[in-house]
Image: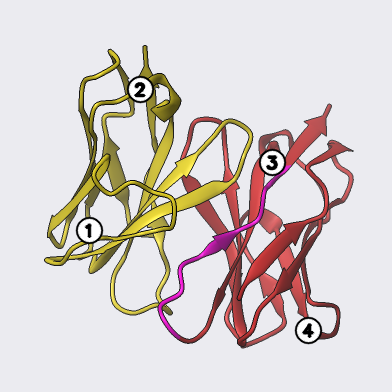
Amino acid sequence: AQSVTQLDSHVSVSEGTPVLLRCNYSSSYSPSLFWYVQHPNKGLQLLLKYTSAATLVKGINGFEAEFKKSETSFHLTKPSAHMSDAAEYFCVVTPNSGNTPLVFGKGTRLSVIA
Amino acid sequence: GAVVSQHPSRVICKSGTSVKIECRSLDFQATTMFWYRQFPKQSLMLMATSNEGSKATYEQGVEKDKFLINHASLTLSTLTVTSAHPEDSSFYICSARSGGPGNEQFFGPGTRLTVL
């Protein structure tokens, strides 16, 4: 079975400071991991994905995430937050095999303070 | 990336009526489409998975007679909420995928349903 735990429901940072959104996963199989962003009343946009290649994954808008198997973590980071980064972020897991649907974390709301 | 559209973006209806939501893949053929429901400030919950030309597979606890899903073509899936009640008010999001499970899912912008 797969599960995702996003450790913080809300993170608040000042503009220009680093962002860290934490995600831990559990998977019976070798997982694929994703981070999606959702702006208010909008659909989800893929930020980045890990599918068993390089463990450090670079995504759009300056975001990146590192897959750490020993820690079962896939934390999302960005060196410098922009006001436009304020949104809801979802960590998602699915196994690499089979037809199992995506499993979403509960989400982390990122606020960026001017 | 590929584009998925949903129509309508917002709908308000009276209790007891039925509402149809369309999900279209605009520039690719979606062999599989997914329907999610999202309550305020909560995560997405998968309702059902549909493959083109076959019956949808519903998640546990989702009433298939209430949430009718049709995936008649490779670019269109519809979700019909039958005899809607206020507790059905929610944000409904579809996603579409071409090919197998390893391929990316592309999400639509969502439909806000309000049942009075």
State if disc 4 and disc 3 touch (CB < 8 Å): no
Between tags 2 and 3, which lies in front? 2
Please name the residue shown 67% across and 85% down the image. A54
CA separation, marks 4 and 1? 36 Å
> Which amino acid type is marked by label 4?
Lys
Which residue has dot 2 on it? B85
Task: Tell me whether marks 3 and 4 sit on the same chain.
Answer: yes
Position of residue A49 measured from the top left corner of the image (x, y, whole percent): 59, 70
Visible in this render: residue B30?
yes
Which residue has dot 1 on it? B27
Q: Residues within 10 Å of mark 4 (few under 14, many from 20)?
A: few
Please name the residue shown 30% across and 25% down the image. B84
CA separation, marks 3 and 4? 27 Å
User: To which chain does the residue with label 3 belong?
Assistant: A
Secondary structure beneath dot 4 equals helix
- Is A21 covered by the magenta stretch? no
**Chain B image colour:** yellow
Please identify the quarter of the rendering in which residue A32 is found: bottom right
Please identify the quarter of the rendering in which residue B41 is found: top right
User: To which chain does the residue with label 1 belong?
Assistant: B
Camera-side residue: B89 or A18? B89
User: To which chain does the residue with label 4 belong?
Assistant: A
> Which amino acid type is marked by label 3?
Asp
The numbered dot on residue A85 is 3
CA separation, marks 2 and 4? 45 Å
The numbered dot on residue A69 is 4
Q: Residues within 10 Å of mark 2 (few under 14, many from 20)?
A: some
Q: Which residues are magenta?
A: A98-108
